[in-house]
Amino acid sequence: MAAKKDPAAGNDVADQLAAIAAELTKMNTKFANGITAEAIAKVVGEVRAQIPKIVSLTNDLRTLTDAKNANLRQLEALRKQARDAVVGQYGDDSPQYAAVGGTKRSERKRPVRKPKA
């Protein structure tokens, strides 16, 4: 099973870049590639603003997924009850049982015995 990803992932990188931005501000140096403390701080702020939204959406997705799974379990139980009712009324070798998705008793594959060698 794959490990679950942390919805707040990226926070460590944001913390590291915030520290780098603070050091660049202290250095007061201009770099040739255009990296500035302000540019880094802006992106760090955007990432930090997105993290609570991601956490909230992840929790909403988890809640909806749990509700869907509960409904699917309920549907499975209803399907079994419906088939059991048909078996009780018409039997397990009836066309009615086959009509509700069951396999008729006469159509089941019989086990084949292997001869002893």
Image: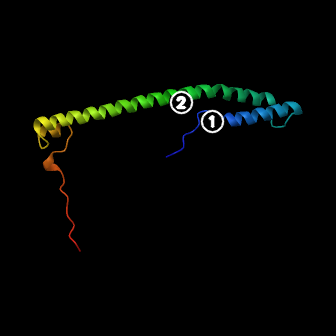
Reading the image, the residue beneath label 1 is: 9
Judged from the image, the secondary structure of the residue bearing numbered disc 1 is: loop
Q: CA distance from mark 1 to mark 2?
A: 12 Å
Q: How is the image coloured?
A: rainbow
In this rendering, the count of numbered labels is 2
Q: Position of residue 117 (x, y in %)?
A: 23, 74
Q: Which residue is mark 2?
A: 58
Quadrant of the image occupied by residue 20: top right
- The answer to whether the residues at label 1 and label 2 have Cβ atoms under 8 Å apart is no
Q: Badge 2: few (under 14), some or many (20 or more) residues near its Cα, within 10 Å?
A: some
Query: Which residue lies at the image location 41% right of the left edge and 28% below the top edge?
Result: 67
**83 to 42, vertically: above or below:** below
- Report whether residue 90 is seen: yes
Q: Is residue 8 left or right of residue 116?
A: right
Q: Nearer the viewer, residue 58 or 116?
A: 116
Amino acid type for the residue under numbered disc 1: Ala
**Mark with earlier residue (1, 2):** 1
Asked which quadrant contains residue 4, the reply is: top right
What's the residue at 57%, 39% (across, down)? 5
Q: Amino acid at mark 2?
A: Thr
Secondary structure state at the residue bearing disc 2: helix
**Residue at the spot x=54%, y=27% of the render?**
57
Mark number displayed over residue 101: none
